[in-house]
Image (tube, rainbow, N blue to C red):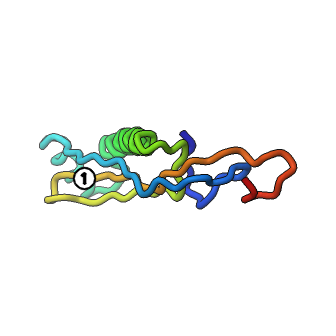
Amino acid sequence: MIIVTTDDVPGYDVVAVHGEVFGLTVRSRNAFSHMGAGLKSMVGGELKGMARNLEQSRHEVMGRLAAAAEARGANAVLAMRFDTSEVGGVWTEICAYGTAVRVVPHAAGSPPGAV
């Protein structure tokens, strides 16, 4: 699965658009982690546990995004973006979204877009 943040894939032509797809997760940390993060935020510095949690979440939603695109018959996702928001003050929603497409390599010697 090719996943890019651009609107096209260099060397490939888009031959079908399958629509918007997304991968989503909602995460919560335990109460002790929240207390520790709250204390750390008073003195400043990186919240390593929270950063680790968000990194794991992004990997998770990317896998879900790819699965959703494959389920629609796509082999690529264009214009992928992440969206993160807080829900209820204790949960974090992480979403990866983009446009599921089918791409094929450019034919040798043909101009881009000529399929």
Q: Amino acid at mark 1?
A: Thr
Left or right, 95 with reference to 7? left
Front one among 73 and 22: 73
Horizontal and vertical percent position of residue 2: 57, 43
Residue at the spot 50% in from the left edge and 44% down from the top edge: 74
- The reply to whether residue 48 is visible in this rendering is no
**Which residue in the structure is indicated by mark 1?**
92
Image vertical order of residue 75 relative to residue 88, above or below: above
Left or right, 72 with reference to 75? left
Left or right, 55 with reference to 89? right
- Residue found at the very far front of the displayed protein: 115
Marks counted in the figure total 1
Residue 111 occupies which quadrant of the picture? bottom right
Horizontal and vertical percent position of residue 33: 20, 42
Residue at the spot 27% in from the left edge and 56% down from the top edge: 41
Image vertical order of residue 42 relative to residue 33, above or below: below
Residue at the spot 45% in from the left edge and 40% down from the top edge: 70
Tag 1's secondary structure? strand
- The reply to whether residue 64 is visible in this rendering is yes
- Residue found at the very far right of the displayed protein: 109
Q: Quadrant of the N terminus?
A: top right
Q: Residues within 10 Å of mark 1 (few under 14, many from 20)?
A: some
Horizontal and vertical percent position of residue 87: 19, 58
Residue 29 occupies which quadrant of the picture? top left
